[in-house]
Image (cartoon, rainbow, N blue to C red):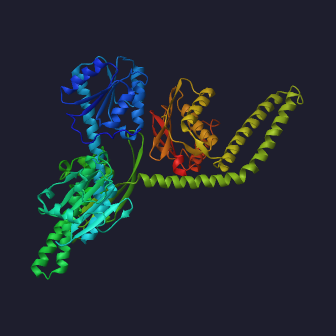
Amino acid sequence: MRLMPVSTGFDTKTATLLVVDDDAGAREGLRNVFESVGHRTIAAADAPAALRLLRKEHCDLVLLDVELPEVDGLALCRLLRAQPTMRQLPVLVFSANDSEHRKVEAFSAGADDYIVKPSTPGELISRVNSHLSFAQWESDLIGSNRELRFLADLGRGLLQTLEPEQVARRVAGATFEGTNSALCACAVKNNGKELAVCVFDREGNAEGSSLINVDRLEAWMASSRSSTPVLLTNQREFVLVDRRRKTEYLTPIRFGGRTVGALAVAFDAREDYTDIDCRLIDAAAQQAALAAHISSLYLAARESAATLAQEVDRRTVEAEMHERFTEAIIDSLPLSLYAIDRNYQIVAWNRNRELGELGMPRGEVLGRDIFDVLTKQRRELLESEFRQVFQTSKIHRIEQETMTRSGDSNHWLISKIPMRANGDHEVSHVITVGENITSRVKSERAVARAEKLAAVGRLAAGVVHEINNPLATIAACAESLQKRIAEGAFGDSSDAEDLREYLGLIRDETFRCKSITNGLLDFSRLRVGNRVPLNVAELIKITARLVTHQQRGDNVKIEVESPIDLPLVLGDEGQLQQAVVALATNAIDAMPDGGTLTLRAMKADRHVLVEIKDTGVGISPENLTKIFDPFFTTKDVGRGTGLGLAVCYGIVSEHGGRLDVRSNVGVGTTFTISLPKASDLD
């Protein structure tokens, strides 16, 4: 089922709302309420009708009644959330049922709000407008981040371009990669002469003019229409020679009021083109204009016999342009950067320092004392780091770890770099650069963990057999002596009772050691057996039944969530079930006072995810990086060997997957198993 993508860049005052209610009077009443304030309203009486509407039309927000015929509102909500294009769509549920249980069900199904009927028009309008505004902010933020990455990548590439052909190749390639286009062409005037043209399609770089109508493009560039971008739907006006495309976006490359080139982008269908794509293409054209102008200056200087004064003027203009361009690149880099002088006054603050939870606008911090701005950091430690750089002229680097509200950890490399302005011998400024190295740290830890597990496996394979034999002998001797005591071989001596107790301890501890060695043996022999296509949804349902029958934990509620169209994975059913059962059992043990265990399966790009989530005591940050190490356990002696999570990690890794964890102390823990789809392994 293909649904229309969620609208981006909509006007929150004139949004399109979908009302799903089997009561025609209620639908008409809601239509009157929302259209009275300018919103467009479409309506459906049941879930199938709503899905048909969403396939045909863009929608900015959905209001649905819980009590719908056949497929209820919560099931429809879950179905929408399972669609990648619908995950950001605001969904408001309304019902006459005001019970807490019903509300929890609605929010668990993915609803953004729960409105109890009857509600006043003012409350309905206020809630809808609030969610529309929040959706717009979220969409703007996603678009801004995508634009920043695009501009940074393109800017770095254009720094190395001096020829018009290089400019055209860089801009066409970056625009094709950064948008959902099917064909992209960039044309730049070669020092006022012929056009330098480069075309990119799904086959790669196609230099030359075979896919572009150069005459039609030059005619458009020479016309008055070339001052602004245009969206073409009439194929007879297309400059790209491809009848299969339905839409073409044509934007001029202008510098100094003149059109010096053009950027043409073709899309397979109208819905493939978004406002974000428009902004990216326009931004690429602006950077291409500056790069084309720099290129023209370079060519002019190379080809002309300029006087010394002209040469000086040209170099001055180039230096100024490069300085402005460099500043723009620094603002576009995916790094947090700021600089201070020797008085600890902020003299530079890049764009990324304005973003995020701790971001502050540049205009509010420039000229201020750094310690008055970075108040969440210890002043003594921060001042010591700055002083060290000023005094030693050496780069100071540290790694920091931060935790988000959701329990995810982020790792940062903070570098403080000395700077000497105007050729001074003394350090005049310190530049601080923050780089997010979370992916690198996690990869390094995964490699180290894999090496550690492999080493333990090799060690276990070599010694387990030699340990098991003595343990079996000790256990057999202890049992034999216990049997002789039971037969009265030692009479009624008071020492016989002590001997019986000691032999019981010897036997119990011997069996505990044997369970550890057996776990090591299983760990060392871990291999993926017979791989068959598996339905992960069925696997977690079976796991829930097994855990329920174990009767572990009091007052623990088990919930299972999975979509009906979950892709299959290839794997050993027994081993994967062993891993999920072990994680679920650990989750129950982490909820001694009761709670909720959630087993959830879902799709994510080219993988299938299995979440095992509890509402227990959580894992402390200092233990979070060690929980997959063999023999590491926080349980009391005798209650765990510390091999369970290591075996789970090995099972998932052998299946080509990944096992991740996030946790908040006192809130709960979520383990996530990521397995590749079976279709991607063919």
Q: Residue 223's spot in the image, x, y percent?
A: 13, 60
Residue 308 left/right relative to 480: left
Q: Quadrant of residue 102?
A: top left
Q: Say if 25 sits above or below 359 in the image.
A: above
- Residue name at image x 31 percent, y 39 percent: 6
Q: Residue 342's spot in the image, x, y percent?
A: 22, 59
- In this rendering, does residue 144 appear at all? yes
Q: Residue 417's spot in the image, x, y percent?
A: 31, 62
Q: Residue 282's spot in the image, x, y percent?
A: 22, 55
Residue 205 left/right relative to 279: right
- Residue name at image x 55 percent, y 46 percent: 628
In front of the other: 283 or 159? 283
In this view, the residue farthest toward the front is 236
Q: Quadrant of residue 209?
A: bottom left
Q: Quadrant of the N terminus?
A: top left
In front of the other: 133 or 445? 133
In front of the other: 213 or 172? 213
Q: Say if 127 sits above or below 254 in the image.
A: above
- Residue name at image x 22 percent, y 59 percent: 285
Q: How many marks?
A: 0
In front of the other: 351 or 194? 194
- In this rendering, does residue 385 appear at all? no
